[in-house]
Image (tube, helix red, strand yellow):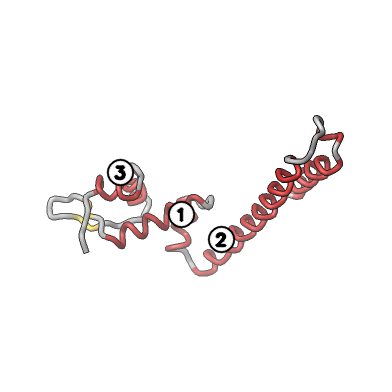
Amino acid sequence: MQEMKIGDAAAALGIEAHVLRHWESVGLLQPSRSPSGHRSYDENDLDVARLILKLQRTGLSLGQIRQLGLGEYDGRLALIADKRSEIQEQIVLLRATDRFLEHLTECRHRVVAECAECSDFTRANRKRRQLR
């Protein structure tokens, strides 16, 4: 397995080197060190970094990502359940938004209040916010 210096690893991931240093400082990455103290990243370290990037894109904080990897089992389950619930809400909203945008390709009304379907979409979003 070929090892990389921090700059090469960061470039391979499409991020800045300081991001890798930060992830190390919060306990998410533990790259090996050369005898002179330089960080050395192998393919496993890069896979962990790719996972962190993907999880961040889903809206998880670094603390939540750390909890998933290092937390107690029950805490992880609660975090997973909460995040999955958020994702399901987002999916419902995205589907409704897609339907609304599709409707707008045909809708000729200038004001939302003049169109029953447009009004329904805005009311549905207002109800969702009130439930939170």
Residue that label 1 marks: 54
Q: In this view, does 51 lie above or below 7?
A: below
Amino acid of disc 1: Lys
Q: In this view, does 85 lie above or below 113?
A: below
Q: Mark 2 or 1 closer to N-term?
A: 1
Structural crowding at the residue carrying mark 1, measured as other residues with C-alpha within 10 Å and reported as few (<14), some (14–19) or many (≥20): few
The quadrant holding residue 130 is top right
Q: Do the residues labelled 3 and 1 touch (CB within 8 Å)?
A: no
Amino acid of disc 2: Leu
Q: Which residue is the extreme one toward the top?
A: 110
Check disc 2 and report its element: helix, strand or loop: helix
Structural crowding at the residue carrying mark 2, measured as other residues with C-alpha within 10 Å and reported as few (<14), some (14–19) or many (≥20): some
Amino acid of disc 3: Ala
**Of the pair 105 and 113, the residue shown nearer to us:** 105
Residue that label 3 marks: 17
Residue 21, position as x, y percentages in the image: 31, 46
